[in-house]
Image (cartoon, rainbow, N blue to C red):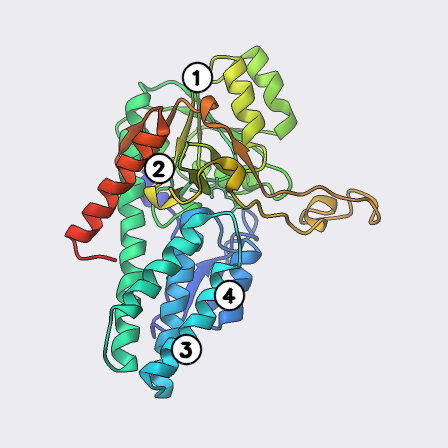
Amino acid sequence: MTDPALSIPETIRWAPRGTSAIILDQTLLPGVFEEKELSTLDDFVEAIYSLRVRGAPLIGITAAIGLAALARQSAAEGVSPDELRARFAGWADRLADARPTAVNLVWAVRRLRARLEAATGAAGELATLLAAEADAIHAEDRRMCRAIGEHAARLLRGGEAVITHCNAGALATGGIGTALAPVYVAAESGRRVRVFADETRPLLQGSRLTAWELSRAGIEVTILADNMAGSLFASTPPDIAFVGSDRIAANGDVANKIGTYPLAVLAHRHGVPFYVLAPTSTVDLGTPTGADIPIEHRDPDEVRRGFGPLLAPEEARVYSPAFDVTPHDLVAGIVTERGIHRPPYIDSLAAAVAEAEADRHSRGVQ
Ligand code: MRU
């Protein structure tokens, strides 16, 4: 088997001059492995909206690197610190609005804004601080993914069949992923598991991305169309379900890629434990319940055409929410970098977030 750690794709990095970013364009996978340079505000917003970069943690990292890249460009133009701050406000609003559901995006933008507000100095110094904060967010995400994987790997003995939805793997983060992290950690220690990946209509993040990265890592993966999950559970139910999340409300309700809720209902019906794996940056204590989570609706053509030929009449109306909400009572546990949290989530999630914030403050991070 390939060493999973060696096969982890790099989702984003700085371009050599440090004023732009290089991303792996995920819209082209699995057929084409192509990187793309993002330089302008429009480039960053477009890449996030079009899912060239996607997954809650990764869009937060991308926005942070984008803000810092734009600040470095402005500093190189010789702008004043006040002008840099004014420009930053406009960039931050555009980036934060690019996609509404994943709270990691606004979380990362807020961190850079707080760093800027607390800082003094010339525009070049401010840009340097912003770049350091973006790098800190990226490095923390890498550590959080690893910690999530180590906690959740305790749920695996080896030999299990794991079902997952969408892609909450390395491609969705700056590290080894969230939902797929325990699969990689278990594999490193010789505990092989098999993965069932829902294809995940309409943009196929399961078949295009999850199956791609697991195959590269030498992990057995079986794809199923979303509407085949009921048949799988009724015949040979998987042992455990691991999914990621875009926003977890204070009460433990979980927004994730559309189709996650039906998977949770099936898991409940068949007695399969359903776990949500996400960093504390995905927990939004300011959102009381799932009903308060803003749900992104996407372009109807993503359902009518996906990436290919017309699959429905042009004039057909389309219902296309990008995410659904799984109520907390269907969730056996939520795994963050702080551990495995159990109900009542209102308490266990608040404690996890408080610990994460205390840890960041003790390290002098925003
Ligand atoms: O629309 P996408 O591809 O950004 O949706 C991604 C998901 O729903 C993931 O499961 C979620 O962001 C968690 S990623 C660790």
Foreground tag (2 vs 3): 3
Q: Which residue is drawn at the image coordinates 31% and 37% (left, top)?
A: 350
**Helix, strand or loop status at disc 2:** loop
The earlier-in-sequence mark between 1 and 3 is: 3
Tag of residue 94: 4
Does residue 36 appear in the picture of this structure? no
Q: CA distance from mark 1 to mark 3?
A: 52 Å
Which residue type does callout 1 highlight? Asp
Q: Report the residue marked by disc 3.
A: 86
The earlier-in-sequence mark between 2 and 3 is: 2
Which residue type does callout 4 highlight? Arg
Q: CA distance from mark 3 to mark 4?
A: 13 Å
Q: Report the residue marked by disc 1.
A: 239
Foreground tag (3 vs 4): 3
Tag of residue 136: none
Which residue type does callout 3 highlight? Ala
The earlier-in-sequence mark between 3 and 4 is: 3
**Residue 243 percent location from the top left of the image:** 45, 32
Assign the C terminus to one quadrant of the image. bottom left
- Residue 125 lies, with reference to residue 224, above or below; the image says below
Mark 4 vs ligand 1: CB below 8 Å: no
Q: Nearer the viewer, residue 361 or 310?
A: 361
The earlier-in-sequence mark between 2 and 4 is: 2
**Helix, strand or loop status at disc 1:** loop
Foreground tag (2 vs 4): 4
Q: Answer yes or no: do the residues labelled 2 and 3 have beta carbons within 8 Å? A: no
The total number of labels drawn is 4
Foreground tag (2 vs 1): 1
The earlier-in-sequence mark between 4 and 1 is: 4
Q: CA distance from mark 4 to mark 1?
A: 42 Å
Q: CA distance from mark 2 to mark 4?
A: 40 Å
- Residue 170 lies, with reference to residue 131, above or below; the image says above
